[in-house]
Amino acid sequence: MDDIAKKNFLCIIKVLGTGKFALMWKHIYPHHKKNKFAQCINPICTMILLDGKIASAHFKVKIQEEVQQIIAAGGKPPHLAAILVGSDGASETYVANKIKTCHEVGFQSTLVRLDPTVSQQTLLDKIQELNTDDNIDGYIVQMPLPKHIDESEITNAINPAKDVDGFCATNVGRIMLEQPGFVSATPKGIMMMIDYFNIPTAGKHCVVIGRSNIVGGPMSILMSRKTNPGNCTVTLCHSATQNLTHFTLQADIVIAAMGKPQFLKADMIKTGAIVIDVGITRITSTQTKSGFKIVGDVDFDDVSKKCSYITPVPGGVGLMTIVGLLQNTLLAAKKSFVY
Ligand code: GUN
């Protein structure tokens, strides 16, 4: 059993207990026989699944322990609020998962629902209210917002000390300048996952596909920093990149965040590449009862045969985004950064 596999097993058994662990194992690797964990190592190590369930369980336990310490010392639990404008299906699911996970780790949470026709000024007023509410440690405004709302004005109205999504100009600037501040939740979660699985990154060529302010942009900055994880040579590819495969074939690490379902194929990566899939899209499927399935930007069945590490979708980066957000909220509650 190699170190990573050992770490996975020990951590998940600690978090879940052996009974739940066996159930989860059956769910993740249904083709392996119960209690034959040792025999399962070889197939896993040719392609290691960067399992968000395992990594997020590890970090959630750590966060929960800190919350208990805060409460034992007479403090109050961290409190996260989420503003949800309208009732977009995907946003509803994301926010519900964030709130559910808050309760798992002992955080307080508040959901502020606003009508999709809400005016820019009413939303700004709500933000002002949360900015000055001492009971709220951090909050997010779930994106995307309706077309009539200026997202940039909204994110920049958030008090940087409560901007646990790390979206406002102050936090983005601080991260760019390597100053203390909130790192955007998805890139933060990915860095935590790379660290958890002990993946060597220094000197590697990391190709990020997608240049969004939320994922691709900050991801490219974090991976190029002189840190561990990080210290990569980074290429940022996007919709205007010519001959994308020319770049992805050179990548030791590919981070796919372009929002194109099952776009990245095996013939676009080199053997042994590390593949991180940020995409989450619901597509129609004849294989499921519901008629839908969730896929990433990577064609998992194809790419997983050729890479060394890969994140599944669902059950990969999405779970780590929530952990990144919880970790930021804990930092906000502890007033970790001075603004
Ligand atoms: N929409 C998609 N991802 C995110 C996220 O991480 N935070 C917020 N606020 N909105 C999102």
Image (cartoon, rainbow, N blue to C red):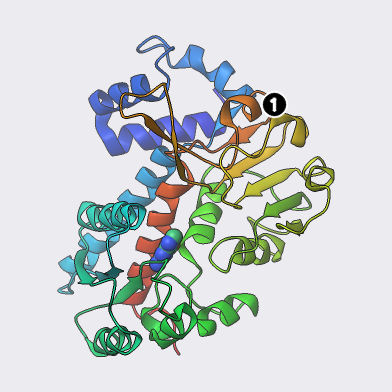
Q: Is there any visible trace of residue 198 in the rendered image?
A: no
Q: Quadrant of the C terminus?
A: bottom left
Residue shown at 75% from the left, 43% from the top: 252
Q: Position of residue 312 (x, y in %)?
A: 50, 35
The three-letter code of the residue at mark 1 reads Lys
Tell me which residue sits at (38%, 55%) in the image.
Answer: 322
Image coords of residue 192 (percent x, y): 51, 53
Height in image: 15 above or below 43? Answer: below
Q: How many marks?
A: 1
Q: Is the residue at mark 1 in contact range of ligand 1, meaning its CB lies under 8 Å from it?
A: no
Q: Quadrant of residue 47?
A: top right
* Residue 215 in sight: yes
Q: Is residue 177 left or right of residue 119?
A: right
Looking at the image, is 285 positioned above or below residue 91? Answer: above
In the picture, residue 304 is in which quadrant?
top right
Where is the N terminus found, in terms of image quarters?
top right
Q: Residues within 10 Å of mark 1 (few under 14, many from 20)?
A: many
Q: Quadrant of ligand 1?
A: bottom left
Horizontal side of 219 relative to 314 (left or right) equals right
Q: Is residue 242 left or right of residue 283?
A: right
Instruction: Judge by depth and name the residue closer to the eye, 155 or 317.
Output: 155
Nearer to the camera, 235 or 106: 235
**Residue at the spot x=46%, y=62% of the render?**
185
Q: Position of residue 229 (x, y in %)?
A: 63, 55
Quadrant in which residue 221 is drawn:
bottom right
Q: Nearer the viewer, residue 123 or 80?
A: 123
> What x and y, as percent, mark residue 219?
62, 61
The residue identified by callout 1 is: 306
From the viewer's side, name the closer residue of 196 and 150: 150
Say what secondary structure mark 1 lies in. loop
